[in-house]
Image (cartoon, helix red, strand yellow):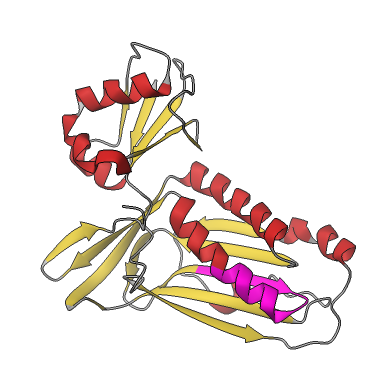
Amino acid sequence: MRVLFFGAARDAVGQSEMEFKLAEKSSAAAFEQLLAAFPELRRFGRSLLFAVNQEYSTADREVNDGDELAVFPPVSGGSPETDKQENDASSAASAGNSPGSTANLAAEREHDFFELTTEPIDVGAVARRVVLSECGATVTLDGYAREWTKGRQTLYLVYEAYAPMAERELALLERAAHERFEIAHIGIVHRTGRLEIGETSVVIAVSAPHRGAAFAACEWSIRELKRTVPIWKKEIFADGEIWVAGENG
C-alpha cells in the first residue's frame, strides 16, 4: 500500500511517501499499524486524519494492497476568533434586475469551477467568470496573507495541498452549495506554494439572483473549505515557523 504524509505529519515522520505492507485489511488496523511504526504521529492524538483513495476514511472501511492511504493533521482552518493569517474581504457588485428561473440557473452550473494554482491569482478575473445576465449580485471573498499574527511578524506563507483529494472535496463543496443556497455559479481558486505578504491565497466568487444567497453561500463555502479541503498552511515568522492547526485541532 502507498502511504502519503502531509503537513506536520510529514515533518514528524521525516518522509512524504512510502510503501507499507498491511497486516490486516480494516482501516482501523492499518492506522494502528502505522502509529506503531511511527510513534511520533501519536502526538497528534485524535486530531490525526486518514484518507483512503482520496476519501476521508472511517474505521470500518476495508483497505487493500494497492490502495493509497494519506495521513495528515487537520486542514489549515485558522483561528475562529482571528482567522489567523487571512483577511477575508467580501464585496457585492453588479446590481441588476433580472433574477432568471431556477431551470436556467441549473443549466448553467457546468460553468462552476474549482482550481489549485501556483500562480498569483487575479481576483477580478475570477469574479468575472461567475457573472450571469440572470443574476443580480456577485459576492467575492479574497483571502490574503497579512504581516502580523498575535504580535509575531510573518515573512511569508507556504501552502501545501493533497491535490487530487482537494479537488474532489472542492467538487463536493460546490454541489452542496447549490443544494443549500439559491445560487447560479460558484468558483473557487486556491493558491499553493510560497506566498508573499499581501498575496491572495484563496478566492471564492458566488453569483446569484439575489445578494442574500450569494453572501450566505460565500461565507458558508469558506468555512467548509477550511474544515474539509486538505490544504495546509505553514507560517514562516521572523523568529520561527509553524504549521497552522485547523479549526478542529
Magenta stretch? 203-219
Question: x, y percentage for residue 148?
Answer: 24, 78
Residue 13 shows up from this direction:
no
Residue 157 shows up from this direction:
yes
**The N terminus lies in which quarter of the figure?**
top left
Please tell me in which quadrant of the rendered image residue 45 appears. top left
Q: Which residue lies furthest to the left in this view?
A: 239
Relative to 245, is 58 above or below? above
**Residue 155 horizontal side relative to residue 87, left or right:** left
Nearer to the camera, 242 or 32: 32
What residue do we see at 52% from left, 69% from top? 203
What residue do we see at 21% from left, 58% from top? 242
Q: Which residue lies furthest to the top in this view?
A: 23
What residue do we see at 19% from left, 76% from top? 153
How many numbered badges does the structure rendering display? 0
Relative to 65, is 122 above or below? below
What residue do we see at 75% from left, 67% from top? 184
Nearer to the camera, 203 or 44: 44
Nearer to the camera, 155 or 89: 89
Q: Does the magenta stretch include residue 204?
A: yes
**Residue 4 horizontal side relative to residue 150, left or right:** right
Question: x, y percentage for residue 29?
Answer: 35, 19
Relative to 59, is 21 above or below? above
Question: x, y percentage for residue 207?
Answer: 70, 73
Question: x, y percentage for residue 211?
Answer: 69, 80
**Residue 184 horizontal side relative to residue 139, left or right:** right
Q: Is residue 101 magenta?
A: no
